[in-house]
Structures are given as structure tokens and as C-alpha cells.
Image (cartoon, rainbow, N blue to C red):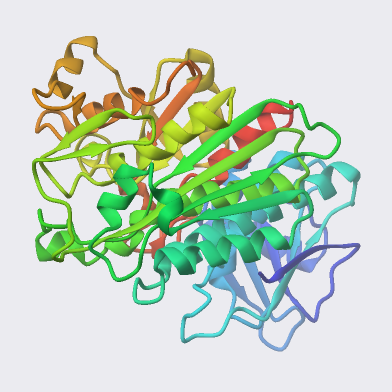
């Protein structure tokens, strides 16, 4: 990640960035005020107007709009600013002294998120940096640290999701988890493979046809000062590539399936951020990792699968594989981890995109308090979600004549998938499921999103976990 730091004053050797309305009584301030007055949309969040100043210093000034000046407006401004800079450009942002810490956090997040570039891209990463010219304070320093942790989590989630599946198999993903956790004191990792997965019937079935065997990863953050803190279990779908199995996807539905582990990437990033911020909340993250391939060993439509908790599912569609691996993870969580809360993130169905579009995830929960916390966290983070119902009369769609339940009925797929997951929550009443298939990928740069993987959910979960601490 490129550097963002505080500076005590402006340096005219650098590019200046001046938000609309920021004070300035020098000649630059007068020119900026005149430009803003002549540009109707200059104040709009995410709008950047370039003021060239040939033969003068600074030689270039960017006029940036932050809308109403809330955190979202400053996040949009940050993303637009970084895209207006060249890779090696050194810039300073002149900020008002009364800027709120939340606004500063939004600006820094926008700069980092808008400046993301996949680590294996042919174009090298940015070498420039950005200085924030404002009176430094502990509140600003904390806001910048929070933004850095959130952006780091999102960058990692984007990197993992953008990685081609020719490299990204379950073993590779597990190795990334081990390497990242090793950098952070207080974190532990357990990786299960081979015969250790005997009870994970869904995971073994889904991953059975691939030359890359499945893995089950448990990664934990326990705050040293609060080992008995509230325990949140995060579960992320980790299908490293999804062909659909024997129920093979059409070409247009398959080419992007390297993103089918976006949920696992996001929950991992959020867990690492909890350690970076030393949040006093216990977090255990479960990553069921498999490649859903086509082959002689593939599970078949009509197969009966026995899950970790001993119950069985009838599967008539091998392309409804995500819920099968998540069921094993949930059974493991309820039997072994004694969680206070479970939150599932999964690129589970494409159906919710029909109702909610490409920027909004579907939220399912029976806990109003938890749903409210996640909605508030998502709103603050800039990741939208919409709560959908869990109708009691839809449960009958899960009925099977030959197993405990049917995993893939053809009715209302997003809602029924959530109802299926609920069957494995045991006695845990505080649970939520976020179906985030559509917002996990952006077809073009869009605000703080860059083309490709979005890392959707990492930001929301960092905010949610901090909220449990009474933080922001």
C-alpha cells in the first residue's frame, strides 16, 4: 500500500489537492474559489477538477468535491483524487481544521481503496504518496489507523479473489492464511486435510472431483487482555473455482467463478484486521475450501450427503455446492466453538441480484439487534445490504423423502438457501447470512471500487467487530 501520512504545512513542490470550501487566503485559494464558482458540479462528491498552473508552483492543483462532507462524501473524494494522480505523483491534501475524524477516515479509505491494484498486475504498484495537511491529533491518528486496517483487509480480500484459479487452489489458499496469521501475535491457525475431513461430508463431496483436494481452515484471534470476550464466528464460502460440477454451468456463467471464494477472502481479511486493531472481541473464522470440478469422482445429482452434524441432505444440483460446504462449517462451529454470534458471508446465489442489483447484498437474520448492527456497519463502510424475509411456509421446500432435507429445491433460491443454512445453526440464536455474490465483483471502476474483485464484506465486518467494542 502506498503511504498516507500527516504533514504540518504545504510544500509547493508537490501537487496540491484542495477540497471545495477549504479555507485559503493565498493566490491558490483565490484561483480555486473562482474555479469552484464557475464549475456547477465542483462540490459533488467524487468530482475532481484540475487547475493547471504552468510556470508556477504548485504547478497543478486538484479541486475535490466531498458532497455534504460526511464520511461517504470524503470516501468518494479520496477515490477520485487518487485516480487523478499519476503513479509517482507526490500530493498534499489541504484539509479544514474542523474536519471530523470520521471524514478523515473516509478520505483515507477512499484514497487507499481507489488506488488498489492487483498485486500480480503487469503495471507496478503506485510509488507516490499522499500527505494530509491538517492539525494532527490523537483522534485523527486513530482514524488513519482504522482506515489503514480496513483498507489492508480489503486489499487482501481483493488480491485473493482476483488471483486466477490456476494458482488459487485450496492448498494455496490455506498457505496464504498461515502466512498472514504468522505476522500477527495472538492468532492461531488450524488446517485440516485428507482423513481429517472424514466428517465433512459436504466439503468432501464438493471437492472430490478436483485434482486439488479440499481443506478446512480455522483461524482465530483472541485478545490477550480479554480471552473471555464475546465470541463471534465468521464463516466464508471458499470455492476456489466453481464449474458447477456435473450440473455444469454455461460458459457465460463460469468464466468468473474464480470469485466464488469472495466470502472466505472477506472474512479472513476482517479477522486479520481485528488483530491489527487489537479489538477486544474473540473472532474465529472458518474457511471450507474446495474446487467444484467435473470428473469421474464428482458427486451426482440425487446423492445423499452426510454433514458434520450427522444430518443428511439430498442434492439434486451440484451447482448448489456452497451451502453444502457451509453446512459442515456451521456444524463444526456449533459443536466445537460455542459461539455467541455466527455471521456467514457467501457468494451463494445469483438470484438476489435480480432484486437488489450489483451493489447490494441480501441480509438474512432472525436477530433484529444483529441485523441492525450489520446494517449500521455496512452503511458506515459504504457496503449496502437489504434485509430479506425468512418465511415459515417456505421451509416445506426443504422437505425430502429420502434425507433430512433437500439442499437445492428450485423455489426462491436465495431465501431457501438461507433457510437451509439456518438448519445448521444449532442453538445459536444470534446469526446472520449475507448473500454477496453480486457485489463481490465490479465490471468497472466505480467510486471506491476498482474493476475486478471488490472485497465486499471485509469493511462491514471490521466496522461490526469494532462496534461490539463500542468503537466506530
Q: Residue at x 81, y 77 (%)?
A: 12
**Quadrant in the rendering for residue 260:** bottom left
Q: Position of residue 65 (x, y in %)?
A: 58, 52
Q: Is residue 445 left or right of residue 201?
A: right
In percent of the image, x 70 and y 55: which residue is there? 148
Q: Is residue 78 visible?
A: no
Q: In terms of image quadrants, where is residue 294?
A: bottom left
Horizontal and vertical percent for residue 421?
Answer: 33, 29
Judge left or right: residue 465 versus residue 14: left
**Is 186 situated above or below 305?**
below
- The image quarter in which residue 441 lies: bottom left
Residue at 40 percent across and 31 percent down: it is: 433
**Image quadrant occupied by the C terminus:** top right
Question: Residue 193, position in %: x, y?
Answer: 45, 58
| Closest to the observer, 189 or 281 | 189
The answer to which of 213 and 272 lies nearer the viewer is 213
Instruction: Work out whether residue 444 can be spotted.
Output: yes
Quarter of the figure that contains the N terminus: bottom right
For the point 9% across and 61% down, the residue is 250
User: In the drawing, does residue 419 fall left or right of residue 297?
Assistant: right
Taking 232 as reference, is 455 above or below it?
Answer: below
Is residue 193 or residue 75 the one in the foreground?
A: 193
In the image shown, does 179 or 250 lie closer to the viewer?
179
Query: x and y percent of residue 336 in the render?
Result: 55, 31
Whether residue 27 is situated above or below residue 407 in the rendered picture:
below
Total number of numbered discs in the rendering:
0
Amino acid at each position: 500500500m502506498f503511504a498516507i501520512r500527516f504533514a504540518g504545512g504545504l510544500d509547493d513542490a508537490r501537487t496540491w489537492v484542495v477540497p471545495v470550501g477549504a479555507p485559503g487566503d493565498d493566490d491558490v485559494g483565490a484561483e480555486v474559489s473562482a474555479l469552484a464558482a464557475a464549475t456547477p458540479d465542483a462540490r459533488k462528491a467524487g468530482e475532481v477538477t484540475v487547475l493547471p498552473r504552468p510556470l508556477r508552483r504548485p504547478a497543478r492543483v486538484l479541486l475535490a468535491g466531498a458532497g455534504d462532507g460526511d464520511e461517504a462524501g470524503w470516501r468518494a473524494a479520496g477515490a477520485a483524487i487518487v485516480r487523478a494522480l499519476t503513479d509517482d505523483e507526490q500530493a498534499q491534501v489541504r484539509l479544514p481544521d474542523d474536519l471530523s475524524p470520521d471524514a478523515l477516515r473516509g478520505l483515507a479509505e477512499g484514497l487507499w481503496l481507489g488506488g488498489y491494484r492487483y498485486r500480480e498486475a503487469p503495471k507496478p504498484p503506485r510509488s507516490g504518496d499522499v500527505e494530509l495537511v491538517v492539525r494532527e491529533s490523537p483522534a485523527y491518528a486513530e482514524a488513519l489507523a482504522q482506515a489503514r486496517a480496513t483498507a489492508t483487509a480489503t486489499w487482501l480480500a481483493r488480491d485473493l479473489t482476483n488471483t486466477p484459479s490456476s494458482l488459487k487452489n485450496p492448498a494455496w489458499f490455506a498457505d496464504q492464511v498461515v502466512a498472514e496469521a504468522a505476522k500477527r501475535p495472538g492468532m492461531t491457525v488450524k488446517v485440516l486435510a485428507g482423513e481429517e475431513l472424514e466428517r465433512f461430508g459436504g466439503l468432501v463431496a464438493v471437492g472430490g472431483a478436483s485434482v486439488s483436494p479440499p481443506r478446512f481452515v480455522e483461524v482465530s484471534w483472541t485478545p490477550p487482555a480479554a480471552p473471555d470476550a464475546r465470541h463471534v464466528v465468521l464463516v466464508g464460502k471458499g470455492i476456489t473455482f466453481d464449474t458447477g460440477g456435473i450440473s455444469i454451468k454455461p460458459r457465460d456463467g463460469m468464466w468468473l467463478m474464480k470469485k466464488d471464494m469472495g466470502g472466505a477472502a472477506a472474512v479472513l481479511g476482517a479477522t486479520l484486521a481485528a488483530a491489527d486493531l487489537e479489538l477486544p472481541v474473540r473472532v474465529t473464522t472458518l474457511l471450507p475450501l474446495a474446487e467444484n470440478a467435473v470428473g469421474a469422482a464428482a458427486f451426482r445429482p440425487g446423492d445423499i450427503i452426510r454433514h458434520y452434524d450427522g444430518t443428511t441432505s439430498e442434492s439434486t444440483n451440484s451447482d448448489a455446492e456452497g451451502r453444502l460446504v457451509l453446512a459442515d462449517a456451521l456444524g463444526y462451529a456449533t459443536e466445537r466453538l460455542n459461539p455467541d454470534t455466527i455471521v456467514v458471508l457467501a457468494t451463494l446465489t445469483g438470484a438476489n441480484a435480480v432484486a437488489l442489483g450489483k451493489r447490494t447484498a441480501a441480509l438474512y437474520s432472525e436477530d433484529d439487534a444483529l441485523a441492525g448492527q450489520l446494517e449500521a456497519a455496512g452503511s458506515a463502510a459504504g457496503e449496502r445490504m437489504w434485509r430479506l424475509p425468512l418465511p415459515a411456509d417456505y421451509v416445506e421446500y426443504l422437505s425430502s423423502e429420502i434425507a433430512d432435507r433437500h439442499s437445492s429445491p428450485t423455489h426462491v433460491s436465495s431465501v431457501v438457501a438461507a433457510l437451509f443454512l439456518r438448519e445448521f445453526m444449532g442453538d445459536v440464536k444470534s446469526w446472520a447470512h449475507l448473500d454477496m455474490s453480486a457485489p463481490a465483483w465490479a465490471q468497472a471502476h466505480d467510486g471506491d471500487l476498482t474493476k475486478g474483485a471488490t472485497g465486499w464484506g471485509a469493511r462491514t465486518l471490521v466496522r461490526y467487530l469494532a462496534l461490539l467494542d463500542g468503537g466506530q
